Amino acid sequence: MVKGLEDGDEMDCTKAAWALNRATCAVKTKVPLEQRMVFIHIVLQVIKIVEITILPYRLCRTLVL
């Protein structure tokens, strides 16, 4: 993906996109809906915690600087 990349060149993300698509399809077909729902709930809770703890700190630093 980044092999031989020089300044100004763009990355070829084709393989990464292909792998993500395969992984998504595998999850949809092999993981039961209930497990996917629990995973999404946990991820959303982690995002909420990050927003509560980190974002105000960054905002304060931005206003002070």
Image (cartoon, rainbow, N blue to C red):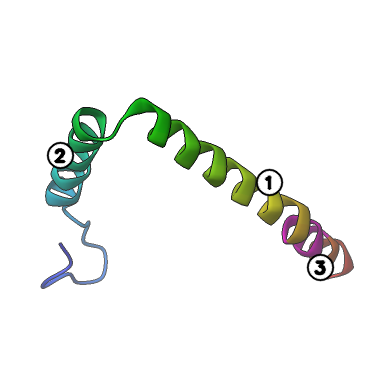
Amino acid on which disc 3 is placed: Arg
Amino acid on which disc 1 is placed: Lys
Q: Mark 2 points at which residue?
A: 22
Q: Main secondary structure of the magenta part?
A: helix
Mark closer to the observer (3, 2): 2
In percent of width and height, residue 13 lies at: 19, 50
In percent of width and height, residue 59 lies at: 80, 58
Q: Name the residue under label 3.
A: 61
Does the magenta portion include 23?
A: no
Q: Give the range drawn in magenta.
A: 54-59
* 1 or 3: tag closer to the N-terminus: 1
Q: Name the residue under label 1.
A: 48
The N terminus: image quadrant: bottom left
Q: What element carries label 3?
A: helix
Q: What element carries label 2?
A: helix
The C terminus: image quadrant: bottom right
Q: Would you place residue 11 above or below residue 6 in this image? A: above
Look at 12% across and 50% down and name the residue there. Answer: 15
Look at 11% across and 73% down and name the residue there. Answer: 4
Residue toward you, 2 or 46: 46
